[in-house]
């Protein structure tokens, strides 16, 4: 898929590239109903769709179909994009393109999910979005169930049924020097007491760490916090937490070699 020159009858080598200034000027015209500007803006963002489609390679899906579905997501993003928000169009559009492709993959998944469960899932997602807009924070399962008048078990089952599996080794962020993976953002709820430290016999090694490293190790492995939570509490980036955590663990290992 990645090396294809033509996809969905579009020659990818001839796709136009717009500057940020051109995109902003075209967007203004698009919002004022200029159809010619709309067509130019769509063509100028097809490379964005292509870059997203390439993430879904190796699933046995038609690249042409995924590209067309991605274009639908991009067009929806154009229609909903708010010029008053201080954000690049690509930043807004990529999640919508990904969402459109994932919906397509779910609906065409060989492991069929019943229509009633799928419909419930979409109602749940709509309710979740509404509550988030109203309260400014992500709602709990109980809140969504109450809004829809259903049991919370129905909410959980419907959401689980439409989730795509994801590898714990999938990178979710890279600052150019350090990658953060899905597993780094997963809270550990089973190994948050002294068993971890006793089993690895690192009590003395922890005393060799500096205050910041010791603080991070304690929050991560004893309190069961995610890297993102630790970063917010300490006022540093998640990449810094990841780096400090790995350095601390490496020091501990060296002390016990």
Image: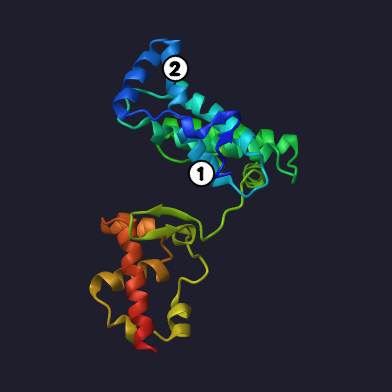
Instruction: Identify which residue, 111 or 41, lies in the foreground.
Output: 41
Q: Which of the marked residues, 2 or 1, is nearer the chain's N terminus?
A: 2
Q: Is residue 27 visible?
A: yes
Q: Quadrant of residue 8?
A: top right
Q: Residues within 10 Å of mark 2 (few under 14, many from 20)?
A: many
**Colour scheme shown:** rainbow
Q: Is residue 48 above or below residue 26?
A: below
Element on which disc 2 rests? helix
Q: Is residue 49 above or below residue 198?
A: above
Residue 190 located left or right of residue 176 = right
Q: Quadrant of residue 250?
A: bottom left
**Residue at 41% across, 62% down:** 225
Question: In the rendered image, which quarter contains the N terminus?
Answer: top right
Instruction: Identify which residue, 2 or 156, lies in the foreground.
Output: 2
Residue identified by numbered label 2:
38
The percent position of residue 117, horizontal first and vertical second, equals 70, 38
The percent position of residue 17, horizontal first and vertical second, equals 39, 30
Instruction: Identify which residue, 57 or 9, lies in the foreground.
Output: 9
Residue identified by numbered label 1:
140
The numbered disc on residue 249 is none
């Amino acid at each position: 898929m990645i090396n294809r020159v033509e996809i969905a009858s579009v020659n990818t080598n001839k796709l136009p590239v717009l500057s940020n200034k051109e995109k902003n000027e075209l967007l203004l015209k698009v919002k004022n109903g200029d159809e010619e500007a709309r067509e130019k803006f769509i063509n100028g963002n097809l490379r964005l769709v292509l870059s997203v489609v390439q993430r879904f390679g190796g699933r046995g899906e038609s690249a042409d179909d995924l590209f067309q579905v991605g274009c639908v997501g991009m067009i929806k993003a154009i229609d909903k994009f708010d010029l008053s928000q201080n954000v690049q169009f690509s930043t807004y559009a990529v999640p919508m393109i990904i969402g459109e492709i994932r919906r397509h993959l779910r609906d065409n998944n060989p492991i069929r999910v019943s229509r009633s469960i799928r419909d419930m899932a979409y109602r749940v997602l709509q309710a979740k979005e509404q509550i988030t807009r109203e309260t400014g924070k992500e709602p709990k399962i109980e809140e969504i169930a109450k809004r829809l008048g259903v049991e919370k078990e129905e909410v959980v089952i419907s959401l689980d049924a439409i989730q795509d599996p994801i590898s714990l080794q999938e990178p979710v962020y890279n600052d150019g020097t350090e990658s953060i993976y899905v597993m780094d953002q997963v809270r550990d709820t089973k190994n948050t007491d002294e068993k971890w430290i006793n089993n690895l016999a690192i009590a003395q090694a922890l005393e060799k760490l500096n205050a910041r490293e010791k603080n991070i190790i304690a929050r991560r492995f004893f309190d069961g916090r995610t890297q993102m939570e630790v970063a917010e509490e300490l006022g540093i980036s998640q990449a810094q937490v990841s780096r400090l955590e790995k350095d601390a663990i490496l020091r501990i290992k060296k002390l016990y070699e």
